[in-house]
């Protein structure tokens, strides 16, 4: 892989054509209104995780334009309404219920794990087909109403296992420290899988260091890591916070290897950590330089609409919208929520924006290929590791 640069996406809700929050209204059972199919999206457009939420929404809107312009659903078109959850779980739940009351046919939600915990019960109660686009919380999928066309990085034997095998073979890693966000269920599960995969490869995990979602000062955590002097530090934290801690480590002379999930791979994280991120590695589920025709179409359409290349979060929103569209097409004209739910349950394969075809097992995408392991370079590009 040649080095590549991902353009920065401005975090501004005004850059999107938002229709606002769903209001109360009669439950129509989600049937198509005329030739317009109404879809709701609960997504953090502002707040601490807007760096992921904005490109997710842009990716979904890119998919809507492709679906409508191509006539993929015949003479029907999708109308996507996006509500800004601000990363607030209570607000996300309220907005989801609002979309239910409005009678949308389906919902895209759950960009972050902290918003995702209650959605399985909500979807089952409302019998509202829901596609999770970004949350990595284990067990979120719950057919026939919740689906996740997102390959979980923490799947046993998946991305982290491949990274663990590579760092042992290529960097002679024997000791590690894992940093987690202890009050985020998704990050804790993420950290536990890293520990399991590293341990299975013979790596001694010296300590798990807890941080918290409200933390802004990581001096204690960084000082603790430096004192332990591991070969590898793994961050199961939000990307910008991982970057802050990596910068702190480098400023204190730490020379060991740093790694994280793919959340560290986006431009907004580089803006925080800068060249201190050089050599930080991560599994990469999407790259805009792929030779796949699916990727080329997505990248071209995204650039035309938003003026920048898509990152992996843009791909997540794109995948979620297209997965829902595949179900709508399979359900047929005039389908209601139950027909859509059953149609989604029948989707056993799905082509991602990366061009990879994943298997859908019990509503969850499963990795079938080798994952790309990439690194940040000193000039802000990314390349294959090692």
Image: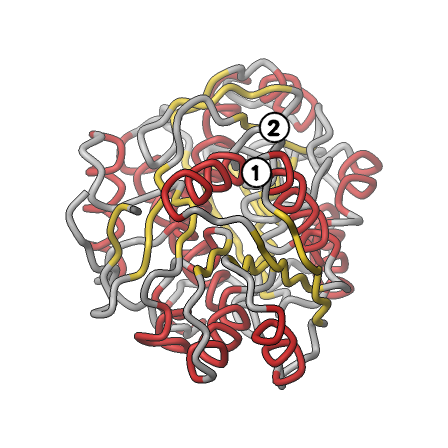
| x and y, in percent, of residue 295 in the image | 26, 37
Q: Quadrant of residue 184 in the image?
A: bottom right
Q: Point out the frontmost of discs 2 and 1.
A: 1
| x and y, in percent, of residue 69 in the image | 27, 37
Residue at 54% of width from left, 28% of height from top? 365
Residue at 25% of width from left, 63% of height from top? 377
| x and y, in percent, of residue 140 in the image | 71, 38
Name the element at disc 2. strand
Residue at 65% of width from left, 17% of height from top? 342
Residue 309: give its label.
Answer: none
Q: Earlier in the sequence, mark 2 or mark 1?
A: 1
Give the left or right position of residue 97, taking residue 45 as reference: right
Asked if the residue at tag 1 contacts the one at tag 2, i.e. Cβ–Cβ closer than 8 Å, the answer is yes
- Above or below: residue 1 compared with residue 11: above
The residue singled out by tag 2 in the image is 364
Who is closer to the viewer here, 103 or 83? 83
Give the left or right position of residue 73, taking residue 21 as reference: left
| Circle 1 crowding by C-alpha within 10 Å: few under 14, some 14–19, many from 20 | many
Residue 152: give its label.
Answer: 1
Who is closer to the viewer here, 283 or 176? 176
Q: Quadrant of the N terminus?
A: top left
| x and y, in percent, of residue 346 in the image | 58, 13
């Amino acid at each position: 892989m040649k080095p590549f640069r991902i353009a920065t996406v401005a975090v501004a809700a005004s850059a999107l054509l938002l229709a606002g929050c769903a209001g109360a209204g009669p439950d129509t059972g989600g049937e198509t209104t005329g030739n317009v199919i109404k879809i709701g999206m609960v997504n953090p457009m502002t707040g601490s995780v807007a760096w992921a939420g904005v490109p997710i929404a842009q990716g979904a809107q890119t998919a809507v334009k492709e679906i409508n312009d191509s006539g993929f659903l015949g003479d029907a078109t999708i109308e996507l309404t996006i509500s800004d959850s601000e990363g607030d779980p209570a607000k996300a739940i309220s907005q989801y219920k609002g979309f239910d009351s409005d009678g949308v046919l389906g919902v895209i939600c759950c960009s972050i794990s902290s918003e995702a915990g209650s959605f399985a019960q909500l979807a089952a109660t409302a019998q509202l087909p829901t596609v999770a686009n970004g949350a990595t919380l284990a067990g979120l999928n719950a057919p026939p109403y919740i689906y996740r066309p997102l390959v979980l990085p923490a799947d046993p034997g998946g991305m982290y296992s491949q990274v663990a095998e590579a760092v042992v073979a290529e960097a002679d890693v024997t000791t590690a420290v894992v940093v987690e966000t202890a009050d985020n269920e998704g990050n804790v599960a993420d950290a536990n899988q890293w520990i399991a995969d590293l341990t299975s490869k013979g790596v001694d995990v010296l300590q798990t260091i807890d941080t918290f979602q409200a933390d802004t000062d990581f001096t204690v955590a960084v000082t603790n890591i430096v004192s332990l002097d591991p070969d590898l530090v793994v961050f199961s934290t939000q990307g910008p916070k991982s970057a802050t801690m990596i910068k702190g480590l480098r400023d204190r002379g730490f020379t060991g290897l740093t790694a994280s999930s793919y959340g560290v791979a986006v431009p907004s994280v580089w803006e925080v950590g800068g060249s201190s991120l050089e050599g930080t590695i991560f599994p990469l589920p999407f790259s805009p330089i792929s030779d796949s025709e699916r990727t080329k179409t997505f990248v071209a359409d995204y650039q035309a609409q938003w003026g920048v290349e898509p990152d992996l979060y843009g791909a997540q929103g794109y995948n979620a919208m297209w997965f829902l569209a595949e179900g709508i097409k399979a359900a047929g004209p005039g389908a209601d929520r139950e027909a859509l739910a059953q149609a989604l349950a029948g989707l056993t394969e799905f082509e991602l924006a990366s061009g990879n075809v994943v298997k859908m097992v019990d509503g969850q995408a499963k990795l079938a290929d080798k994952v790309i392991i990439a690194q940040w370079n000193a000039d802000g590009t990314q390349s294959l590791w090692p």
